[in-house]
Amino acid sequence: MVDHDALLRSWKEISEKLRQHWAELANEDFQSFNGDVNQVVELIQRKTGDARTIVERYLNELSANAASAFERSTEDVREYARESGERIEEGTRQAVEAWRESRKMAEAYARQRPVASMAVCFGAGILAGLVLGLSVRRR
């Protein structure tokens, strides 16, 4: 039995292989393909004179190859997605760890130099206020 879904998914490649296998077939023969496997089999029989079993056997082979190629591609995509997810998790873990370390360093600095820390925060607040005030004023 011809794998109808595999045939549809890989129709372009399969139709090229059919034309290579049977020189009597032309591009125009497959342009009106609507997913009807019987239509394709009958067309090939009519053009080539080969028996239905031969045509179906070759279509089965092509559709099986297409199905296994699709399955391999699907598995490759799953593996890529899994690896990407692991990389994202690792990057997130590293970012969180770096943030925690930076926070600890900032707390230690603030404890060691409270006046300097207050001055830096005050200056940052003034600067942020000026930037915000200028941006509002321009509108």
Image: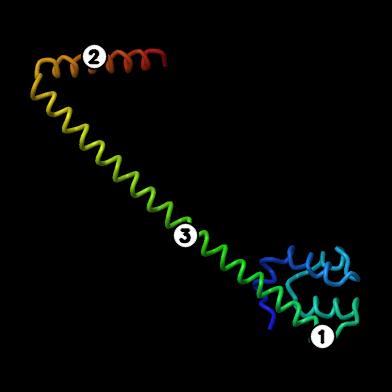
The amino acid at mark 2 is Ile
Q: Is residue 18 above or below residue 79?
A: below
In what element is the residue under mark 1? Answer: helix
The amino acid at mark 1 is Arg
Q: Nearer the viewer, mark 1 or mark 3?
A: 3
Which coloring applies here? rainbow
Residue 52: numbered disc: 1
Residue 79: numbered disc: 3
User: How many neighbours does mark 2 have within 10 angstroms: few (below 14), some (14-19), or many (20 or more)?
Assistant: few
Circle 1/circle 3 CB separation < 8 Å: no
Q: Position of residue 32 (x, y in %)?
A: 81, 67
Of mark 1 and mark 2, the one earlier in the sequence is 1
Identify the image quadrant of residue 1.
Answer: bottom right
Of mark 1 and mark 3, the one earlier in the sequence is 1
Q: Identify the residue under disc 2.
A: 126
The amino acid at mark 3 is Glu
User: How many neighbours does mark 3 have within 10 angstroms: few (below 14), some (14-19), or many (20 or more)?
Assistant: few
